[in-house]
Amino acid sequence: MSDAVLKDECLKAETVVVTGAGSGLGRAIALRLLGLGAKVIGIGRLAERLEETGALAGDGAKRYSSRALDLRDEAALESHVAAISQAHAVTALVNNAGGQFVAPATAITRRGWNAVIDLNLTAVFRLCQLFQPALAKSGGAIVNISLSPIERGALGMVHGIAARAGVLGMTKSLALEWAPQGIRVNCIGPGSVATAGLDEEVSAETKPRLVAGIPLGRLTRPEEVAEFVGYLVSPAGRMISGQMLQIDGLAHLGAPIDLLP
């Protein structure tokens, strides 16, 4: 059964910045938005992976461009956002880039904590802040990709949960503050997504327990998340803002899963 339900070319008026577009969920989001007619600017750390995303876009490749940078590099981030805003009339921002490591709370160093907070919270705020003028001009949308268990917690993920809980509070606050400018801000909790990144983060022994903890009985497909991102940045999503939208098969209401060995 196809996950594609949106009308072809429904995003032909949109120009969307997608972070983490070089792999996994970010790549799936970028490709689907291109398939729906949007212009997409992909951001990521590795230029070759971003170029691979463009190579997979087919006819959409002519509407795709990319920029390689570390989102934690403040000077580079400011420079690239300024260049993008000057070259494109940006109408949406998808903050997908992120990552964390699995560790008990007592084993997380100050450096490890700061690295996760900087990437998953601070960089997301700075991207929202830097693109705000362009989004105010276009009456655009922000979609922040979060984690499903931010309200109930997750074992071995205290740093990642803290960062993404901050993103949810930020999402609601920005949605209220920027509503008069026509900017919509939402959060998606995609649950455990079937990507290569999940295989790298979670051991083979842990994955069956992840699936067993999902009431609907399977991992989320990247294409399902990408389709919903398309909906939120489309005209159909113009009255949705300040929301935490779970696409996780009800995993956020299940029991916490121990990700530690």
Image (cartoon, rainbow, N blue to C red):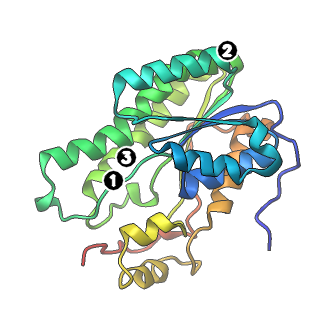
Based on the displayed image, in which of its 4 quarters is residue 111 positioned?
A: top left
The disc labelled 3 sits on which kind of residue? Ala
Distance, label 2 to label 1, CA atoms, is 33 Å
The disc labelled 2 sits on which kind of residue? Lys
Q: Which mark identifies residue 161? A: 1
Q: Nearer the viewer, mark 2 or mark 3?
A: 2
The disc labelled 1 sits on which kind of residue? Ile
Assess whether mark 1 and mark 2 are in contact (beta carbons under 8 angstroms). no
Q: How far from the left and from the top, in percent, is residue 58?
A: 79, 51
Q: Nearer the viewer, residue 57 or 35?
A: 57
Based on the displayed image, in which of its 4 quarters is residue 117 positioned?
A: top left
Q: Which mark identifies residue 137? A: 2
Q: Secondary structure at mark 3?
A: helix
Task: Classify 171 as above or below 253.
Answer: above
| Residue assigned mark 3 | 165
Q: Nearer the viewer, residue 76 or 233?
A: 76
Left or right of residue 185, residue 77 in this image: left
Q: Secondary structure at mark 2?
A: helix
Q: Which mark identifies residue 66? A: none
